[in-house]
Image: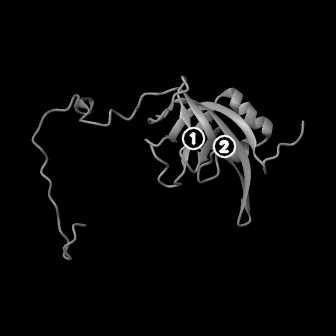
Amino acid sequence: MSKPDFANGVRVILSGTTTWAQLTPTSGPNQFSEKFQVDLTLDDKSAEEIKSLGVENFLNIKDPEGEAKYDSLTVRVKTNKAPPVYDRNKKVFDDYINNGSVMRIAAIVKSWEYMGKKGLTCYFNQGVVLEAAERQEGDGGGIDDALFNDMPLSKSPKITQTVAEDGLPF
């Protein structure tokens, strides 16, 4: 088998579970990176594919201390423009992709070099949402009654504010 040519890009099909997906016009790009991206925790077959290329240590997302951020091999797949995302029926998927959704993604693993640094990036080409997870953080509207279960009713707490000599409230 010949050595993969990462300078020209190596095409891979990856499947896994999503975290922090921002891939559709509805979600918009990530506010910090300004890219459309997803952290994809790879299924066993996809993890083996990345390992067979010898790039798992380069693509596995790391925390600030340089340790693996997730318990399983997880790669960040990104692109500058909103990529085509479909549902299982080949219809355009333009909704939020919640944490825990399952996707299959066509991507390119490509090397880069900038200002004396080198690395590999996994670029998103297109994807399909295989299983859309329900939103876990709440319904996003109204008061969640479970928040108040087993809480005795009382008067609203009195809020006092002290003002420093300079007139600032801190």
Question: Amino acid under label 2?
Answer: Asn
Residue that lies at the very extreme toward the top in this rendered image: 89
Image point (34%, 33%), residue name: 138
Instruction: Determine the secondary structure under disc 1.
Output: strand
Q: With respect to residue 34, does 86 lie above or below? A: above
| Residue 58, horizontal then vertical, whole percent | 71, 47
Task: Judge whether residue 71 can be spotted in this image.
Answer: no
Q: Which quadrant holds residue 43? A: top right
Image point (62%, 48%), residue name: 62
Depth check, front residue: 121 or 58? 121
Residue that lies at the very extreme toward the bottom in this rendered image: 166
| Residue 142, horizontal then vertical, whole percent | 24, 35
Dot label at residue 39 = 1
Residue that lies at the very extreme toward the left in this rendered image: 155
Depth check, front residue: 137 or 65? 137
Q: With respect to residue 68, does 135 lie above or below? A: above
| Residue 136, horizontal then vertical, whole percent | 40, 32
Depth check, front residue: 71 or 21? 21
| Residue 108, horizontal then vertical, whole percent | 70, 42
Depth check, front residue: 92 or 10? 92
Instruction: Determine the secondary structure under disc 2.
Output: loop
Q: Nearer the viewer, mark 1 or mark 2?
A: 1
Q: On the picture, is 155 further left or further right than 32?
A: left
Image point (14%, 58%), residue name: 160
Dot label at residue 60 = 2
Question: Amino acid under label 1?
Answer: Asp
